Amino acid sequence: MNTKNSEKLYKKGCENLVGAVNSPVRAFASVGGNPLFIDKAKGAYIKDVDGNKYIDMVLSYGPMILGHRNKNVEKAVAQALKKGYSFGASTHAEIKLAKLVCDAFPGMDKVRFVNSGTEAVLSAIRLARAHTNRDKIVKFSGCYHGHMDAMLVAAGSGLATLSLPGSKGVPAQAVENTLIAEYNNLESVKAHFEKNDDIAAVILEPVTGNMGVVEPTQEFIQGIRELTKEKGALLICDEVMTGFRSQFGGAQELIGVQADITCLGKVIGGGFPVGAYGASDEIMSNVAPLGGMYQAGTLSGNPIAMAAGISTLTELQKQNPYDQFNEVAEKVEGMLLTSANKYGVELTVNRFGSMINPFFTNKEVTNFTDAQTSDTDKFAKFFWAMMENGVFLPPSQFEAWFLSTEIKEVELEKLSVAIDKSMGVVGSL
Ligand code: KE4
């Protein structure tokens, strides 16, 4: 595969960018080699600066659910651009997107837009602490909630890929109120509540994407909901990745739980920087300017980003692609398992709606410890073989693959061939 121009840009990028990237996972650290540089994208496809064309299963780590350059989103953005880019004052577009989001989440009366998922989570945690007057937060190993200090302990995603236990630069006191539990292990949560009477909230990915895809058991998720209610703590569902991806609204409705605070991002910005956190009137009344919990942002509710978000969600409402996502994901799962069988490769495939990923292990994967039994060397071989065969995957065993509405029969055919050839490479190791 010719990567001459990417290599050139990589060298140039290293002059003024850290590792030539603006987010660590893009560095391809866990699959080896250097980052590819993208030139452009359209529909289901993305093209790098050497002209290599791929079916895109990264989709900017989720936002591009309608594929790249959806014509209606592009039209809405072009219209908004004609009216100005940023005002530092409220606009009608913010009200429209707020209504679309709140109507999609039972129990969410009000929402506040911010500029990233990290900002949504850090605000939600501050809100939970403000509402309960408590400090401790329970999170789960393998779940990633952005890069705020208090969440950079046993995080999944980039950290799991780089296998760093926490992060340099995070002072001890920043994480002294963060309690870590094991996903799908209700006892590990109960143990924290037995030892601590100042837990403000439990935060989790309602279906994880950052240790790969892992669904909660009903016993686990209902147990947490009951426990937090009983103890006066809040449940924060971090739907930055799952929001609007597996149904219109959140994964929490599909798994049968209602969070007190929901964090959003990615899809609601349609590729532009948007995060959000929302809750009941009672909880959101804590937030300035109504209440004493401060949170602010120069570009929050940016009109261009709002236009992209409104048109993306409106398009999703119109298309209602969720049954199709399940069908396509089932087919991709079948391709992976069939080829793994054919070449004698140990593989477990987890999927939820339009999120799917193979683990190179024969274990069932229900938590981060299970996920870490995966053979990341085999994943790396598979990754590069898929690239050679025209499929761009997230460069990490611990990331979910994302489906867009633009994956049609033609793309499924290509995926089937690529998966079979790539699994053959792994099988021949
Ligand atoms: P951002 O700050 O990257 O917008 O969102 C942080 C975040 C919060 N919560 C969840 C569940 C998330 O998945 C994320 C970000 N996801 C990663 C992919 N695993 C973003 C990719 C990256 O870090 O470059």
Image (cartoon, rainbow, N blue to C red):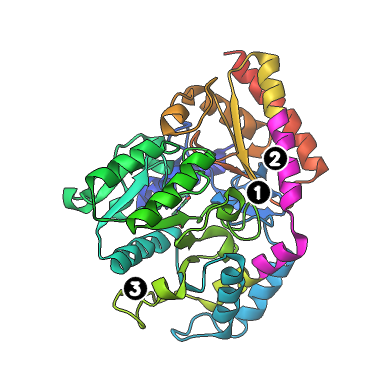
Camera-nearest residue between 3 and 280: 280
Does mark 3 have its CB less than 8 Å from ligand 1?
Answer: no
Find disc 3 in the rendering and name its residue. 295
The residue drawn where x is 49% and y is 76% is 301
Q: Residue furthest front?
A: 230
Find disc 1 in the rendering and name its residue. 46
C-alpha gap between disc 1 and disc 2: 20 Å
Amino acid at circle 3: Gln
The residue drawn where x is 31% and y is 47% is 152
**Looking at the image, residue 90 lies above or below residue 267:** below
Whole-percent x, y for residue 149 in the image: 28, 53
Q: For the residue labelled by badge 1, is the local secondary structure a helix, a strand or a loop?
A: strand
346 sits left or right of 222 in the view: right
328 part of magenta stretch: yes
* Dot 3 crowding, Cα within 10 Å, few <14, some 14–19, many 20+: some
**Looking at the image, residue 248 lies above or below residue 337:** below
Per the rendered image, the range of residues in magenta is: 311-334
Amino acid at circle 1: Ile
Residue 265's tag is none
Magenta stretch: dominant secondary structure: helix
Whether tag 1 and tag 3 are in contact, CB under 8 A, the answer is: no
214 sits left or right of 236 in the view: right
Whole-percent x, y for residue 320 in the image: 74, 59
Whole-percent x, y for residue 46 in the image: 65, 48
Q: Of marks 3 and 2, which one's residue comes earlier in the chain?
A: 3
> Can the viewer see residue 154 in this picture?
no
* Dot 2 crowding, Cα within 10 Å, few <14, some 14–19, many 20+: many
Residue 329's tag is 2
**Can you say which quadrant of the picture contains the N terminus?**
top right
